[in-house]
Image (cartoon, grey):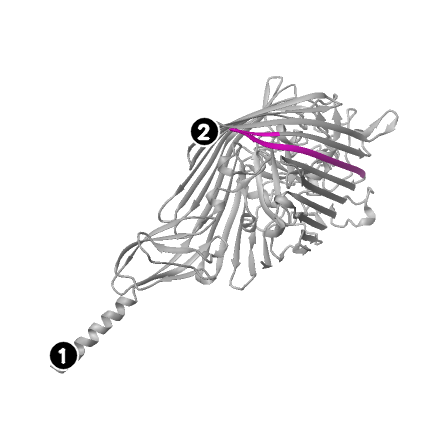
Amino acid sequence: MKQNLFFALIIVFINSGLAQNEAIKGRVFDADGPVPFVNIYLEHSQTGTATDENGKFILSNLAPGTYTLIASAIGYQPFKKNVTIANGETVTLNLNLITSAQNLNETVVTGTLKAVNRMDSPVPVEVYSPTFLKQNPTPNIFEALQNVNGVRPQINCNVCNTGDIHINGLEGPYTLVLIDGMPIVSGLGTVYGLSGIPNSLIDQIEVVKGPASTLYGSEAVGGLINIITKHTPEAPTFFADSFGSSWGEFNLDIGTKFSLGKKADALIGLNYFKYDTPIDNNNDNFTDLTLQDRISVFQKWNFKRKNARIFSLAGRFFYEDRWGGELQWTPEFRGGDEIYGESIYTRRWEVIGKYQLPVNENVLLSVSYNDHHQNSVYGNVPYLADQRIGFGQLTWDKTLGKHDILLGTALRYNYYDDNTPATANLEGNFADEIWIPSFFLQDEFKINNKHALLGGIRYDYDQRHGSILTPRGAYRYKITDNDIVRFNFGTGFRVVNLFTEDHAALTGSRDVVITEELNPEKSFNFNLNYLKKVYMDNGMYIGLDASLFHTRFSNQILPDYDTNPNQIIYDNLDGSSVSQGVSANLDLVLPSGLKFLLGATYQDVTNKENGNKKQQILTERFSGTWNASYTFRQLNLSVDYTGNIYGPMRLPLLSDLDPRAEYSPTWSIQNIQFTFKGWANFELYTGVKNLLNWTPNRGNPFIIARANDPFDKEVQFDANGEAIATQDNPYALTFDPSYVYGPNQGIRGFLGLRYSIN
């Protein structure tokens, strides 16, 4: 009897102890790792806690049953999950919070020249964060944009590898690139200025597709990219990011911030990139990748003023020495006709300033200035150029009832001088120097919480072309807080300088022919956009951003490679040019933590002249991008799989006998990266780029025409100057590196290390 009583007491004691062990524990993560100080509680109860500095939490002393667990923190979408606890059970969970970037509530400034919530903006703006850039580490912004849907970095020369950015199939000069809202990168800088901006200093990249000339003037015809640098107080105290590749590339980003008394904070960053190992995997005796030695220094100051008024000043210095060409080329052959090489020395500096006037109204003065010097030779053809661009803008932001008004005036100074016919007349060389004053007005009328209208108009006076008006309009319909429809329409204009924009005009043996005085290009655009976001109780998130776009050009200027294979002919198109299509992004976060960003674009970009309709050269019909990410929490290991795919493009052939393919194949660049975050302040990352080892020479007998005779010394010509087919030249070709649509750089591994102190 005593023994039975003893065992009964033991059983009761054990059961009591087990009941006290019933609990819910786990960790909370976002895309960058554990999240501290997250509120964790059970719905309709007094039971709650917060995560510690490592994102861990525990809710103990619970009774068996089913609970609704809620996790919430500022900047994150609330997380709900139903949890069932059995008798004596401890449930372990890993919770993945959706950050504000996926919440689509970022503040954007590019669409309307003022800071607004992205969901409230009548102009659709795509936003890409530093996390997006880290998923495929690159040494410059040019390469970083390769996984943005509808945006394609286009390499324009097989030899020097310079390039530009295409948006919705439109050529690079139609894309305006801004730094902190200022038109710093344009003209000569479009070709080289996208390199050397330290990725570690970037806070976000905003992309607007379609004309934005009403606010930004010429060059914003196809769209714009605004690179926004970090606000100094929010930047890490110190950061460093360095990686190298199996091809011998080396990249270093390093920076720090400091305070100067109580009135000023400074952020300074340095980017250095070097590649000096000639590689020729396609066996044409030309470098597959241009050799580069580049340094860029960036500094930004923020000054503290009364009433939190804005005063900031930033500057950047950039120097690059790059060359590509025959493997045996050395600097002593620069400019000669023995060994072919394309050598470019670029020196550039920029300043940007913003100052909010000390008045009761919100009046902001923005200024920028850049000086770009280029000393380059393409074989034995020198190209020496100087460009200076000054920009000043004064804006008044005023709210009157339901009207949000922006009134502004701008003054742009352009100076350009080179050694080409672009700046020459019968009397000799003269610099192209012009002042362009502008006035613009924008009014956003919020009818109610669901409906808003935006109207704007800009007036520019260009002494070469007279008065230019560019109106635009937009309508936003907020069906619900998670369903937005936007309709935008507007016009754009662009004044062309061929020699600063089109590399084909400077390299190869084709003659440049300008048949008439070129008039400004004009465009009309409309864009219908639908944005939808869905949050589910289990933590799943679905975001859809889809657009239908149409742009029609008049006076468009495109290089004509078809009329005469030995010439590049430039004139205003006597007809129409259209870019139209549909584009969509799908953002998907699964409860398991697996994340996808998928994008697809189908576009029809055609030119019609004299009844003939042709697909625009070097423009794909369809494209796709993807980013897939997953974190193995127990291993502190993240995996990122990124890639893109492009449909066939029409390519520039030299003659009817040219054996190279008239259209490119469907091609894809794919990458994988592994990132280890198990050490405090450190991230170690490694991976493989171009997993498929794809290069454009596949299926082609050669890429560079007459690579064995780059100065055409053995080419025979007829009386009209056209190449003749001979035994040595059976296809009647001349030297030409413009047959290029993708990178020649094949598969390679990379290894990098990041370090930061917050």
Is residue 667 something that shows in the picture?
Answer: no
Provide the secondary structure element on which disc 2 rests: loop
Q: Are marks 2 and 1 in contact (CB under 8 Å)?
A: no
Q: Is residue 328 above or below residue 739?
A: below
Amino acid found under the numbered disc labelled 1? Asn
Q: Earlier in the sequence, mark 2 or mark 1?
A: 1
The residue drawn where x is 33% and y is 63% is 60
Give the quadrant of residue 417: top right
Is residue 35 something that shows in the picture?
Answer: yes
**Residue 316 position within the rendered picture, expressed as x and y whole percent measured from the top left:** 71, 47
**Residue 683 position within the rendered picture, expressed as x and y whole percent measured from the top left:** 55, 59
Residue highlighted by disc 1: 4
The span picked out in magenta is 381-406
* Horizontal arrangement in the rendering, residue 20 relative to residue 272 (left or right): left
Q: Main secondary structure of the magenta part?
A: strand
**Residue 106 position within the rendered picture, expressed as x and y whole percent measured from the top left:** 52, 42
* In-front residue for pair 217/198: 217
In the rendered image, residue 401 lying in the magenta stretch gets the answer yes
Q: Is residue 173 above or below residue 59?
A: above
Give the quadrant of residue 399: top right
The residue drawn where x is 39% and y is 53% is 71
* In-front residue for pair 564/534: 534
- Badge 1, how many Cα within 10 Å: few under 14, some, many 20+? few
Farthest-out residue, left: 1
**Residue 562 position within the rendered picture, expressed as x and y whole percent measured from the top left:** 66, 26
* Horizontal arrangement in the rendering, residue 626 relative to residue 726 (left or right): left
Q: Is residue 696 above or below residue 752?
A: above
* In-front residue for pair 212/616: 212
Amino acid found under the numbered disc labelled 2? Asn
Residue highlighted by disc 2: 448
